[in-house]
Image (cartoon, grey):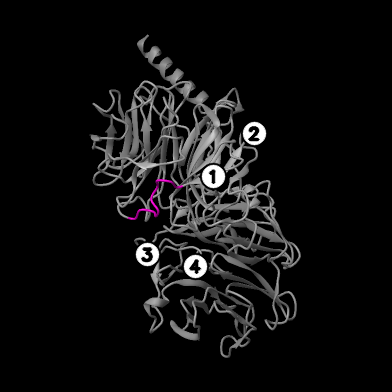
Amino acid sequence: MAKRDEIGFFLILFLSFFLYSGVASGAEIETKFPHWEFAGWYGGGFYPNVTFDPNREGQVYLLSDVAGIWKSDNLGEKWYPCNQGLDNLIVSFLEVAPSDSNVLYAGTAKGLYLSRNQGESWERCVSKSGKISFIRPDNYRSLIISKKNPGVIFAGTKNGKIYSSSDFGFHWKSLKKPHGLSKGDMLVSVLQFDMAEKGFYAALGNKFYYYSFENHSWRLLKKSSQKITDFFITEENLPSIYLAGEKALYISKDGGKGWVLSSPILKGRIFRVAVSENEKKGVIYIIWNKGWHGGIYVSIDGGKTWSGTSNDIKFDKELNPTRLWANGEDRFVSLKINPFDSQILFTTSAWGVFRSNDGGFHWQEKINGAPNSVGSDIHIASTGEIYVATMDNGLLKSTNGGETYQALFPSQGYRDDINGHIWRVISNPQNPNILIGTSSPWGKRINQVIISQDGGLNFKLVQSGLPDRRPKVNTMWKEGYPRAIAFDPKNPSTVYLGIDGDDGGGLFISRDSGWHWQRSKGQPHSRRIYNALAVDPKEHRRIFWGAYGEEGGLYISEDSGKSWRKAFSQMKKIFDLEVSPEGWIYLAGDFDGPAVFISKNAGGNWSLLKRFPGEGTAEALFIHPENPKKMAVSTVRWNGDAHGKIYSSPDGGETWRDITGDLPAGAGAAAMDYNPQDKSLYIVRYAASVYKTKF
C-alpha cells in the first residue's frame, strides 16, 4: 500500500509538471510565461551597421550599439530580434558566410560570436583572453570569411591585431604586424580577401596593406594623412581600389600600384564607400561626416563630380515620434548595396536606418520592429498616461497603453539647453498634470529640472539653486547627473533631488514644487547616488539615501535632510530603493551579484531578502500600488551585457519567480511602473524601449 501511495505521489508530481510545462490532452500550449508585449517606439538610437545576406534575396541584418541584432526577410519592412545567446549587445559588425547563409559571425565589445542558424542562437568563440574584441563604429568590416570554407576566418581587432582561425573561431593564430606599425596605427577598420583568396587587404590606422598567404608577408600599398575608415575593392584579377578617410577618395585602377585622387567633396571627410559594379563605369557612393552631421554623395563619372543624394528622406514619424525634432542632418554610419539589385541601398545613421529603391536618390526610414532607444525612467499617472524618460530621445508620452507616442521634450528642432538626456520624470501626487523631470542637455555641461503644468504640452527650464556645472569628483559616471528625485508624500510642494558627485552634488530641496532649489545644509557622507532616493510614506520627515562606493550604504535623515546617519553598510553598491506603505525599506544593488535587502523597522535591522543568479546588480525596484506585497525587480549587467532578467514576488519578497518569459534577450530594466488602466506592468529597458505584461 505504501509503495502504491509513493507511485501515486510521483505520478501526480509528474502530471503537475507535465501540465505546468504547457502540454495537456495532446494540445500544445504556449510554454513561455509570461508574455511580454512591445509598448514603445522604434528608432532613435545608434545603429552602427547593416549587412546583406549575399545568398538570400531580401534578407538583411541590422546591428545596434545597445540592443544587439535584428533580422529582416523582406528588405527591412519588418525587423525581428535575434539575440539569443549573444551575451554582449554592443555589436560592431556582422558577416554572413558566402558559402553558407546559416553561418554568421558578430563582432562585439566582448568578443566574437558565431551563429549556425541564421541568428536564431549564438555561441561565443574563444577570444584569446579578451584580446579579440571590437569597437563600433571603427571596426566596420573587420572580419572576412573564406568563400570555400565558412570556418576559415580572419579578424582584425580594436587593438590592431589580426587573428586567423580555421575552426569557426575556437582556436586562433596571431599574424605578425606589418613592420614599422606605430601605436597610432592600431585599429583595424576593414579586411577584404583578394579575388583568388591568395591574400587579403587591410586598413590599419592610416595605412593600407596587402598580406600574402604565399610568403606570409605584408606589403604597404598606400599611406594616408588620415585614418582609413573604409575601402572598396572590385572583384577583378587586377582590381580597382577606393580608399575612404580624406576629403577625396584615393583610387587605384591597377591593384594598388598607382593612385589618383577623386574630386574633393564639399564638406567633411569621407567615412564610408561602396561601388556598384553592374554598370561599365560603376557608381560610387560615399558617406561624409563632420562632427554629428553627415550625408551621402554619389558619382557616376568615377569620382570626377559628386551630387548629394540624402536630401530626400521620408521619416517615419509615427513609429519614431522623435522625428518631430530629429529630422535634420545626421551622422551616417554605414552604407551597403543589395547584392541582388544595385538600385537598392541601405544606410544607417546615429538615429535610424533607411532604404533607397532608386540608387540612393530617395530614402525611406525602415525601423519597424527595431527599438534602439535607451530608457532611464517610466512613470504612469493614475489616469493611465505613460511618460518615458530616455537618454538622447528626450521625454515621450503615450495615452493609449503604448500603442503610439508623442515627443514632449524636445518637441521641435535643436537647442543647446534642451536636447539631451532626461533621467527621471514624476507627476504631482495631487495633480497628475504637473510633471517634474530632470535633464542634462548635450550642448551645456549643466543639470536642470524641467516642469510642465499641462501634462507635458509645455515645459519650463529650471536651474535656480542648482550647480552651474556638472560634478566630476566621485561620480557614478564621468560626470554627476540628477538621477534621483522624490516628492514629499504629505506635502507635494516639497521635492527632493539627488545629484552624484562630491564637487557640487548631493541633496537639493525645493519647497515650491520644483521652481527653486537649495542645497541641503545637511548631507549624507557619500554623495555618489544613482536612483536610490525615497521618502517614508508613514513619516514624511524621514528620507532614505542609497549610496555607491567605499562609503556606500544607506543613509537616513529623520529631519527632512538637516542631519544624517548611516543605517546600513553591508551592501556598498546600492542602485535603487523603495519604501512600502507600511514603511518597509527595500534596497536593490550589487552584493557579489544582484541582491535585495529589507528592513521592516525603519532601518534598525536588515536581512538579505534575495540574491539573484548571475553577475551584475539588482535595479528598477517596483511595489504594486494596489497590493504592496506584490513586487518586481530587474537584474542588470553593465557594459552592454545581455543577461537582464525580470523577477516578481507575491509576498513582499519572501519568494520570487523569473518572469522574463518571452521578453527579447537584452539588458535589464531601468525602471518599472504599473498601469491601472490595463492592469499591466511596464518596463523601460536600458536598451530596446518599453515592454508590458499583465501583472
Task: Quote the CA–CA distance across marks 1 and 3.
Answer: 48 Å
Mark 2 highlights which residue? Answer: 400
Residue stretch in magenta? 463-472
Disc 4 residue type (three-letter): Asp
Residue 181 lies in what quarter of the image?
bottom left
Comparing labels 1 and 2, the label whose residue is closer to the camera: 1
Residue under label 1: 460
Q: Residue furthest top?
A: 1
Quarter that holds the N terminus: top left
> In the picture shown, does residue 303 fall above or below 440?
below
Which is closer to the viewer, label 3 or label 2? 2
Q: CA distance from mark 1 to mark 2?
A: 26 Å
| Label 3 sits on residue | 131
Front one among 284 and 253: 284
Earlier in the chain: of badge 3 and badge 4, it is 3
Q: Are marks 1 and 4 in contact (CB under 8 Å)?
A: no
Q: Amino acid at mark 2?
A: Asn
Residue 98 place in picture, x, y as percent: 60, 65
Cα distance in 3D space between marks 1 and 4: 39 Å
Q: Position of residue 459 (x, y in %)?
A: 56, 43
Specify the amino acid type for callout 3: Lys
Residue 340: percent from the left, percent from the top?
71, 65
Front-most of residues 118 and 590: 590
- Which residue in the protein does label 4 denote? 138
Residue that appears at 47% across and 79% down:
206
Q: Earlier in the sequence, mark 1 or mark 2?
A: 2
- Tag 1–tag 3 contact (CB < 8 Å): no
